[in-house]
Image: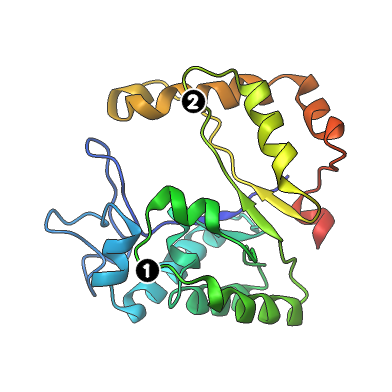
């Protein structure tokens, strides 16, 4: 089973928040002692060395729990941004764990409202990943289904637009009890994703788009 480490440097909800494992150092936290809520705030306030320590602490905690991760990715994409991605790459190389690399992160950058985002550095990141034998995705795909649409047709629309290549599709399928209490506007699309992909027939949406599903183990 694919199980990655979702490196986390932000805490976006107002009523449900979390703190760094390494403590409130190096600009990792806001005035309340929690992670900043948005990636832009991390870029503006966090020291790269403190981010590197936090990345290492999260990976080492997972390894200590007896899990060998198949990959490293990033909550809200923050650890994939320059300059933090190079410390993430170093941590991945140290533990022989591939890092998520996409040549195009426009969907993510647009959703997060990143200020002054320049994707040029991704070419260099991709070259390093290829050098290490790690997969390089052509595109990062993500989208939350609007309230007035069904998830099946919405997914078909996404698949119609992606074109050829190796695509990383980020899902947020969730039916956690109490989720709506602190993020009501996100509850409906997450539930829609869960209900669609809990059905065995969900694969037919990808087959209809002439897509083949792969996992990190296959890619390795």
* Number of disc labels: 2
Give the residue drawn at x 62%, y 62%: 100
Q: In terms of secondary structure, where does tag 2 sit?
A: loop
Give the residue drawn at x 72%, y 66%: 136
Q: Quadrant of the C terminus?
A: bottom right
Q: In terms of secondary structure, where does tag 1 sit?
A: loop
Q: Residue 65: in sight, yes or no?
A: no
Residue 53, quarter of the rendered image: bottom left
**Residue 192, percent across and down?**
55, 21
The residue tagged 2 is 146
The residue tagged 1 is 116
Establish if 19 lies above or below 60.
above
Q: CA distance from mark 2 to mark 1?
A: 27 Å
* Visual colour scheme: rainbow
Q: Residues within 10 Å of mark 2 (few under 14, many from 20)?
A: few
- First in residue order: circle 2 vs circle 1: 1
Could you tell whether 44 is left or right of 125 in the image?
A: left
Establish if 45 lies above or below 141.
below
């Amino acid at each position: 089973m694919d199980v990655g480490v979702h490196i986390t440097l932000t805490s976006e909800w107002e009523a449900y928040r979390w703190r760094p494992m390494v403590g409130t150092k190096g600009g990792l936290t806001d005035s309340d002692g929690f992670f900043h809520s948005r990636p832009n705030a991390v870029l503006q306030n966090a020291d790269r060395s403190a981010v590197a320590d936090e990345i290492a602490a999260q990976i080492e905690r997972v390894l200590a729990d007896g899990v060998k991760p198949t990959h490293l990715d990033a909550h809200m994409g923050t650890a994939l941004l320059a300059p933090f991605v190079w410390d993430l790459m170093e941590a991945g190389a140290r533990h022989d764990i591939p890092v998520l690399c996409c040549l195009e992160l426009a969907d993510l950058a647009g959703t997060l409202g990143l200020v002054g985002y320049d994707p040029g550095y991704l070419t260099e990141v991709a070259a390093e990943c290829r050098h290490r034998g790690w997969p390089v995705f052509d595109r990062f795909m993500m989208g939350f289904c609007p309230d007035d649409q069904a998830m099946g047709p919405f997914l078909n629309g996404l698949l119609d637009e992606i074109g050829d290549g190796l695509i990383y599709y980020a899902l947020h399928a969730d039916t956690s009890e109490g989720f709506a209490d602190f993020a009501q506007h996100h509850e409906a699309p997450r539930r829609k994703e869960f209900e669609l992909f809990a059905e065995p027939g969900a694969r037919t949406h990808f087959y209809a788009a002439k897509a083949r599903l792969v996992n990190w183990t296959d890619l390795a």
